[in-house]
Amino acid sequence: MSVIRQCVRSRNPARLLAALIFSVATPSPGTAADDVTEFHLHQENAGQWVVEAPHATDARLKTKATSEPPATFPWGVFRVPGQDEPEKTLVPVAGRWVIENDRLLFRPRYPFRQGLRFQVTEVRYGAAGRTLWDFRIPRGGGPEPKLVEIRPAGGRWPANLLRVYLHFNRSMAQGEASRRIVIRDESGRTLIQPFLELDQELWDPDGRRLTLLFDPGRVKQGLKPREEDGAILEPGHRYTIEVLPGWPDSRGIPTEDRFEKTIEVELPDEVPIAPRKWRIEPPKARTNDPLVVKFEQTVDTGIALRLIGVLESGECPLDGKTEISADGLIWKFTPRVAWSPGLHFIEVDPALEDPSGNQVGRPFESDTKAGGESLMKTAKPTRLTFVVQAAE
């Protein structure tokens, strides 16, 4: 549990010297002139920071904090924009002043981001007024955030690529992608909205992998967006993906380095996935050695982790850890319990895709049978067999 204090106003010099951060001599709104208003930054047991005004004794403040529905409060909490943000207006922090255990607290609706700067201000006509307290949320420990890699790995991408993955070393803040990621062609021209605009970014549960989708309407042939705006990636051309610095992680600590990846675009990949051509390397029984599967062609590294599974001979799913190489060519499964000897199955969901959207037995450009029935509705999982031999 941590407490950071700052006196906004105090008549006692000794108390002023005891403050951890400099003091600002100013009376708080709605309080008597000789009242002492002090703000603390308090970290609760769950790790969330709240702003506390423990000596705010004016009854009107407590009445407003306990009213239902919430009344207009004379103080507000605002985020101070960073240096890299073009808009310098203070940003209101969603939350509410409440009374808990006879303490006046500001509890944000969402956790304060570590490392960012905030202010408590008077609120006049719904906007920030005079500053009462300026504070910064402390940063936690651990490594500095950075972008580790962009997938697909390698420097050659097909012109009909659908997904791009950004892998970070830490859990990252969301809502930053649109202003941090730029794609430029050989002439330095910035591509306009190459990625599909979504209401919510596509992060994995850990907040470390971001999925970017090229607009399918400009990837698939014959669709209106492609006819009007053209393809995003053109074969024979070179592009540079640039990820700008300043992307904060979940603690509020920004990335420091600019990340660039240059790729050359090849002809579209229209070959469907063929699991029967995969090479399987079975493990030995009574071990926890991984099952290794080597693909004939690259598969989508994000999707493959979810859509390939292992069954025992009784068709019971096995629990374990799956991993895939950065190039999408090698898949491994390590069981939590040692392998039992006998027949096993690898089950491949028909929705498994390669980076260009080609699925099991079906290229991306093909949606339906001749009769108009969706291929996905009739497709069934593919099962590959392998035998776990007893250890000699």
Image: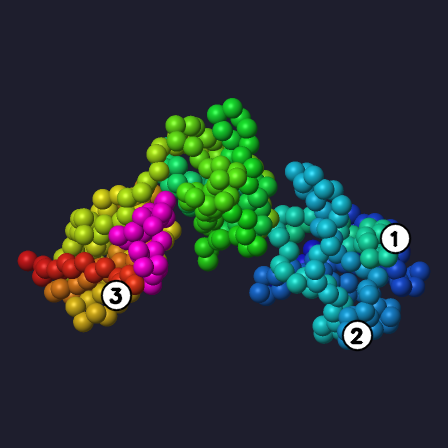
Is residue 9 highlighted in magenta? no
Residue depicted at x 58% and y 61%: 47
Between 15 and 87, the one lying in front of the other is 87
Determine which residue is flagged by label 2.
67
Instruction: Describe the element under mark 3 as helix, strand or loop.
Output: loop
Q: In the figure, 206 relative to 316: above or below?
A: above
For marks 3 and 1 on the same chain, the one whose residue lies earlier in the sequence:
1
Q: In the figure, 96 relative to 265: above or below?
A: below
Q: Main secondary structure of the magenta part?
A: loop
Residue depicted at x 22% and y 47%: 294
Between 328 and 251, the one lying in front of the other is 328
Determine which residue is flagged by label 3.
318
Which quadrant of the view contains residue 314? bottom left
Determine which residue is flagged by label 1.
26
Residue 256 showing in the rendered view: no
Residue 1 percent coordinates (x, y): 61, 62
In the image, farthest residue toward the right: 33
- The coloring applied to the image is rainbow
Amino acid of disc 1: Thr
Amino acid of disc 3: Leu
Amino acid of disc 2: Ser
In the image, farthest residue toward the top: 187
Q: In the figure, 200 relative to 315: above or below?
A: above
